[in-house]
Image (cartoon, grey):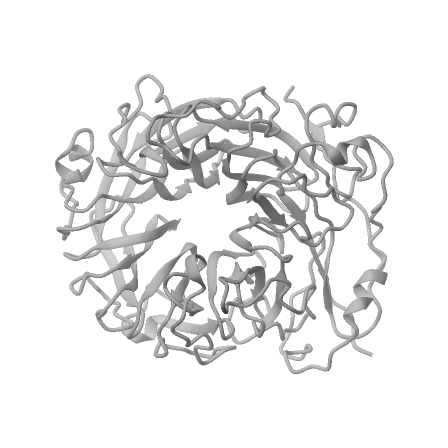
């Protein structure tokens, strides 16, 4: 039976070192949120923080990817990177404290943690060696096994792996770096297999989709400038009959790997003769493989598409392939007159493609928008935190069965007057679109059907100093249909440090969960444990209750406000005090932690009088 750690009573989550968690074990399947809350007072609906806490060790810890399966008692898997030699694990694995020569950013290893309910850690493991390892993507397969991908410098591939040999290049900060994919047993976290993925340049796997009906995995990554991956072993056979316009510079590659990790089913380039770069995403729907990337190519193929014209700079590019990648069914540019970049984790497909672009263009197409204009039109960036200058997020809903401009069915900007970036999209089964990211804007739009949990920026805008961002969560939808003119929720979530939410996962019904990272010591907490001084912390937020589908007659963005302090009196039944082995007031509070913030946005409709 796998080791299970109860984080903090049934409702409130707290994560500590193994010693601090002694005596806190609970059976697998314990429901962490099986209770009813009193309805909030009458008035406009309000979003509230349900609970929050911290995970990790005394170093730098970050969550970069999240996946979920199920509803209120969902299994949730988070993945990222850690430098903490005391990162809490259930299998005894630890960060390798030795350092490869030429890696100034080491030690740094990947971690994967499975939670359930979500207040229970089922298992937690660290993957890596003396080099630099970092997980960037994670997915749950049809048999509930976990697939994780990222970059690795010292990983050992398993016998018979599709690509058993490290071939990556090196950087000063990370040393040698190649892409990897591993499959972990969903019940225990034990590694079933690992393989390298990628060419001779430094890089990693940046997008991953696990086939729910079968065992295959589709991944997306970028090659080094000028590399002919289609001529290299073991990739040449997978490219046969498929590779298209290949650049003299960098390229995006989408590849299907079988569930044993031993066979490359097929591979193809995405884009045109210029560079493809950035952080691409991949999703599969009805057998069609969708890829979102960033391109500088003026000749990327656009069958049935071409929503915007060929780019003068960098634009987003959406491509749709047949299930064997022999046919490109659809292709379109997504951008305007300035640089427009595919958002990390910026694609989800459910009949239509829901895409996110981070834009600096004032001429992005909009259709039935909640925000019709670029608000972050400045040219000064937030220092190292935003080297490209100010900008906004952009969301588009695309019907890839339509032709040309008719395929764009909805589009909106999302942002304030400073730097705002989207870094995660998800679609609930009830039909709503959920978006996460980070913002430096003190005027980020929080007007929505639900009053925001956090109505103002807790960080600081850019100015003489780089500033400090907050995370944000926005949810769009009406009548269970993810259209973009109606924001159900838009809220800041952060403290006085730099905070950002980097991924969204969805489950049954209205269940959604977001994750990210924070340097704040004052990130909003409810019943959880305080940070223990790590350089950065992970963040995760999940709603415990969800409003019924909103109708066109419900309170919209212009509805009169209500006292947001009412959220404190909503009767959540959360014990914020100490006591017990997992309580915030116990000795566990001094244990080394990193912030996997388990913050929960509680949202429930309130009838208007």
Q: Looking at the image, can residue 466 be seen?
A: yes
Residue 341 picture location, percent across and down: 34, 61
Q: Place residue 91 in its image quadrant.
A: top right
On the question of residue 354 being in view, the answer is no
Q: Looking at the figure, which quarter contains the N terminus?
A: top right
> Left or right: 318 with respect to 67?
left
Tell me the quarter of the picture where residue 384 sits.
bottom left
The answer to which image quadrant residue 301 occupies is bottom left
Please indicate whether residue 407 sits to the left or right of residue 50 in the image: left
**Eyeballing the image, is 597 above or below 338?**
above
Looking at the picture, tell me which residue is in the foreground, 9 or 383: 383
* Relative image position of residue 565 (x, y in whole percent): 80, 67
Quarter the C terminus occupies: bottom right
Compared across the picture, whether 135 is left or right of 556 comes to left
In this view of the protein, which residue sits in the foreground, 11 or 432? 11
* Residue lying at the far front of the rendered structure: 464
The residue at the point 50 percent across, 75 percent down is 417
Q: Look at 38% across and 32% down and name the residue there.
A: 181
- Residue 340 rendering spot, x and y as whole percentages: 33, 66
Task: In this rendered view, identify the residue nearer to me: 133 or 430.
Answer: 133
Where is residue 541? Give x, y as percent. Answer: 63, 51
């Amino acid at each position: 039976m796998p080791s299970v750690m109860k984080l903090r009573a049934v409702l409130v989550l707290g994560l500590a070192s193994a010693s601090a968690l002694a005596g806190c074990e609970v059976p697998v399947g314990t429901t962490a949120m099986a209770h009813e809350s009193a309805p909030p007072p009458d008035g406009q609906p309000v979003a509230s923080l349900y609970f929050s806490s911290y995970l990790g060790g005394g170093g730098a810890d970050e969550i970069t990817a999240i996946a979920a399966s199920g509803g209120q008692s969902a299994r949730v898997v988070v993945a990222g990177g850690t430098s903490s030699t005391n990162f809490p694990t259930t299998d005894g694995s630890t960060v390798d404290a030795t350092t490869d020569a030429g890696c100034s950013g080491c030690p740094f290893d990947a971690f994967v943690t499975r939670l359930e309910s979500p207040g229970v850690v089922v298992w937690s493991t660290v993957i890596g060696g003396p080099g630099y390892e970092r997980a960037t993507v994670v997915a749950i397969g049809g048999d509930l096994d976990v697939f994780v991908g990222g970059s690795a410098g010292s990983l050992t591939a398993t016998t018979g792996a599709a690509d058993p040999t490290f071939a990556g290049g090196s950087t000063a900060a990370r040393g040698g770096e190649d892409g990897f994919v591993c499959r972990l047993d969903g019940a225990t976290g034990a590694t079933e297999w690992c393989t390298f993925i990628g060419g001779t340049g430094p890089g990693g796997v940046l997008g991953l989709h696990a086939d729910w009906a079968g065992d295959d995995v589709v991944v997306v990554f970028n090659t080094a400038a000028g590399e002919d991956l289609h001529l290299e072993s073991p990739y040449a056979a997978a490219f046969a009959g498929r590779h298209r316009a290949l650049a003299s510079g960098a390229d995006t590659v989408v590849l299907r790997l079988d569930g044993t990790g031993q066979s490359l089913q097929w591979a193809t380039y995405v884009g045109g003769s210029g560079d493809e770069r950035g952080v691409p995403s991949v999703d599969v729907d009805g057998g069609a493989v969708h890829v979102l990337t960033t391109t500088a190519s003026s000749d990327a193929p656009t069958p049935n598409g071409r929503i915007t014209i060929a780019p003068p700079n960098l634009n987003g590019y959406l491509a749709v392939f047949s299930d064997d990648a022999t046919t490109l069914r659809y292709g379109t540019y997504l951008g305007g007159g300035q640089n427009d970049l595919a958002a990390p984790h910026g694609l989800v497909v459910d009949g239509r493609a829901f895409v996110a672009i981070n834009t600096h263009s004032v001429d992005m197409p909009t259709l039935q928008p909640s925000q019709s204009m670029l608000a972050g039109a400045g040219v000064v960036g937030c220092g190292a935190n935003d080297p490209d200058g100010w900008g906004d997020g952009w969301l588009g809903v695309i019907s890839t069965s339509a032709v040309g401009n008719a395929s764009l069915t909805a589009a909106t900007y999302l942002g304030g007057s400073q730097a705002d970036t989207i870094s995660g999209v998800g679609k609930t089964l009830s039909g709503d679109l959920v978006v996460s990211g980070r913002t430096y804007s003190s005027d980020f739009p929080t007007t929505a059907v639900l009053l925001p949990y956090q109505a103002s920026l807790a960080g600081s805008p850019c100015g003489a100093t780089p500033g400090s961002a907050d995370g944000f969560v926005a949810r769009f939808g009406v009548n269970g249909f993810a259209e973009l003119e109606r924001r159900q929720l838009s809220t800041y979530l952060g403290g006085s440090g730099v905070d950002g939410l980097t991924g969204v996962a969805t489950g049954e019904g209205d269940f959604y969960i977001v994750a990210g990272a924070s340097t704040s010591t004052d990130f909003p907490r409810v019943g959880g444990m305080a940070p223990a001084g790590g350089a950065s912390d992970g963040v995760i937020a999940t709603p415990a209750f969800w409003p019924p589908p909103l109708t066109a007659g419900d309170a919209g963005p212009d509805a009169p406000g209500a006292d947001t302090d009412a959220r404190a009196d909503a009767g959540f039944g959360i014990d914020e005090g100490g006591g017990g082995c997992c309580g915030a007031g116990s000795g566990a509070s001094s244990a080394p932690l990193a912030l996997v913030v388990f913050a929960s946005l509680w949202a429930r409709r309130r009838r208007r009088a």
